[in-house]
């Protein structure tokens, strides 16, 4: 049996925080994007635009983070 794919580790603080929300994301890909958003928010870059964030987390392009924010199926209930 093949083990399920796991999200790549980021910073221990972010990994620990984000694991509390893992069950909200249907795929590893969306969960990884969730973690990457947090890495970008906590980075020391000036201006937290998506292109700057994707460079900080080492992504090839910003589409992954853009799609996570605009096309996700999660719903915020207030």
Image: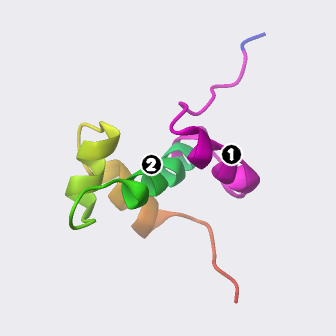
Q: Is residue 10 left or right of residue 56?
A: right
Against 77, residue 23 (above or below) is above
Against 9, residue 45 (above or below) is below
Q: In this view, does 17 lie to the left or right of 49?
A: right
User: Residue beneath label 1, please?
Assistant: 16
Real-space Cα separation, disc 1 to disc 2, in angstroms: 13 Å
Badge number at residue 36? 2
Q: Is mark 2 on a helix, strand or loop?
A: helix
Q: How crowded is mark 1: few (under 14 residues within 10 Å), some or many (20 or more)?
A: few
Q: Residue at x 43, y 66 (%)?
A: 69
Viewer-nearest of labels 1 and 2? 1
Image quarter (top left, top right, bottom left or bottom right) of the N terminus? top right
> Which color scheme is applied?
rainbow
Q: Residue at x 63, y 75 (%)?
A: 75
Q: Most extreme residue toward the front, as rendered?
A: 44
Question: Is residue 60 found inside the magenta-colored segment of the image?
Answer: no
Q: Most extreme residue toward the bottom, as rendered?
A: 78
Q: Could you say which is closer to the camera, residue 50 or residue 29? A: 50
Q: Which residue is drawn at 57% across and 48% down?
A: 14
Q: Could you say which is closer to the camera, residue 45 or residue 72? A: 45
- The residues colored magenta run 3-29
The spot of residue 77 in percent (x, y) is: 70, 84
Q: Most extreme residue toward the top, as rendered?
A: 1
Task: Determine the image quadrant of residue 6.
Answer: top right
Are the residues at dot 1 and dot 2 in contact (C-beta closer than 8 Å)? no
Question: Is residue 8 found inside the magenta-colored segment of the image?
Answer: yes
Q: In this view, does 65 lie to the left or right of 32?
A: left
Against 61, residue 41 (above or below) is below
The spot of residue 67 in percent (x, y) is: 38, 58
Pointer 1 or 2: first along the chain: 1
Against 32, residue 41 (above or below) is below
């Amino acid at each position: 049996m093949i083990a399920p794919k796991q999200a790549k580790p980021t910073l221990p603080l972010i990994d620990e925080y984000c694991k509390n929300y893992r069950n909200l994301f249907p795929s590893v890909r969306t969960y990884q994007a969730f973690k990457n958003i947090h890495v970008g928010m906590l980075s020391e870059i000036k201006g937290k635009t998506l292109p700057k964030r994707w460079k900080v987390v080492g992504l090839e392009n910003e589409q992954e983070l853009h799609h996570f924010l605009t096309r996700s199926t999660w719903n915020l209930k207030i």
